Amino acid sequence: MEHGVFSYFLLEGLMGDADYDSNSLIFLTDINRYVTSKLTEWGLTNRKEQKPTLQLDVTGDIFLVYVPKEASQDLPATFTITSGAGPITVPSEDISNVFKEIIYMSNEELDENREIFTNMYNLIDSEQGYNKKIEKSKQILECYLNSRFSASNILYYFMPVFILITAYKDIKKWISDKPAFKEIFIREFVNSGSFNYAGITSKIICNLIPSFTDDELLEIINGIETNDQIIYSFSARKNVYMIINASRMILSPDEFDELKKLYEA
Amino acid sequence: MSQSISNGKRNALLVGINSYYLDGAIGNLRYCVNDVKSLNEILSNHLRGDFNTYLLTSDTNEKNDEPNRSNIMSMLRLIANSAGPNDTLLFYFAGHGIEKDGKSYILPADSKMNILDETAISIDWIKNTLNESSAKQRILVLDSCYSGSKLGRMAGRMTEAF
């Protein structure tokens, strides 16, 4: 994909190169420093003048993006999975086989194999081009669906991957006529057994708001009302508030106000 | 400068224009749409920028997503007016810019060079709109050139925070 010079350096900086102090946070001044120096360098080599100007007139710097730690690392060609029977090596391209290996694992084993899930995240993130990312995302979701009955406990480990996947516009569209997927995410959310779990699953539900039917939204709302882990979860708060707002058309005015009150405090 | 991450909403309006359809005198550009789409991928990603992004790009078929003057102005007004003090606003424009009679403008897709006042958007207007917002964190990035005589996109850029 081709880019303008300025945006090329801007994108490069935002992807992590402007993280001068390696704290995974990129601020406006970081980006300014990065783009300015790159453009100056480029201008000298190509004998063209580039003059970006940055005028700052605020008391604090402005935070722009996080850099997920793993993003700049190269994706390994294979996943190594540790199990009772010793390590198993699976090519990272072959996602369905990775699933086959992790499907019967206990929570402890899954914990030991955490990096698989980080790698899956990278697998999508490192794909060049939007369409490829979407393709890979669908593949991962389908693999997960086929394994769900034996492996509901692995959903927790997949959360970062699913939060990423469900944020894509085309995935939202794709999922809207896949009730089986939606059912899993709804089930996991309404049955949240901890504040933390409610926080993570609510983010996915939030991403998928455009994909749900009215009935599904009602099921979610009912789940919120009856689960204390969701109601009192701080990390779920913002997401749940958005879900309630998105459901206002299908709730009675009283019910809506009551729910809203619960979250406006 | 102190670094802080506010917990407010983060809204970004991203505009990318490759083709100018009303005035043949305004040449087409090559990378603006791609630039904006890639930027959108990073900014809207929940694990990276976590911005709510609004895209106006010239490759769209939807009337509402067209980067014409009225869409750009109304979207910018909308996100500027609806923002609270803790929110962050970002306006990014990739396309032609021009300087005339000491005034700088960006050129929406439906600009006409002979009636700039009515068809272009002055940078003063953009700054005023952002300044009138309650959001304390406002970022303006103009990826355009203001060489005046010749239209181009390589000579100068402006990034501003208020």
Image (cartoon, coloured by chain):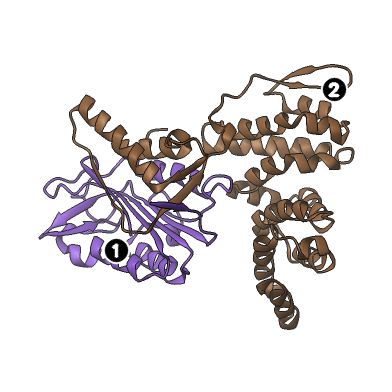
Chain colours: A brown, B purple
Location of residue B136 in the rendering, given as x and y in whole percent from the top left corner: 41, 64
Alpha-carbon neighbours of circle 2 within 10 Å: few (<14), some, or many (≥20)?
some
Any part of residue B120 in sight: no
A156 left or right of B10 in image: right
Task: Identify the residue at the far front of this view.
Answer: B2
Residue drawn at (69%, 69%) of the image: A244
Quick one: quadrant of the C terminus of chain A? bottom right
Mark 2 secondary-structure assignment: loop
Tell me: residue B143, above or below residue A73. below
Quick one: quadrant of the N terminus of chain A? top left
Quadrant of res B68: bottom left
Q: Which residue is mark 1?
A: B127
Residue drawn at (35%, 65%) of the image: B130
Residue flagged by tag 2: what amino acid is it? Ser
Location of residue A3 in the rendering, given as x and y in whole percent from the top left corner: 36, 36
Residue flagged by tag 1: what amino acid is it? Lys
Any part of residue A244 in sight: yes
Quadrant of res B28: top left
Q: CA distance from mark 1 to mark 2?
A: 59 Å
Mark 1 secondary-structure assignment: helix
Q: Which residue is mark 2?
A: A83
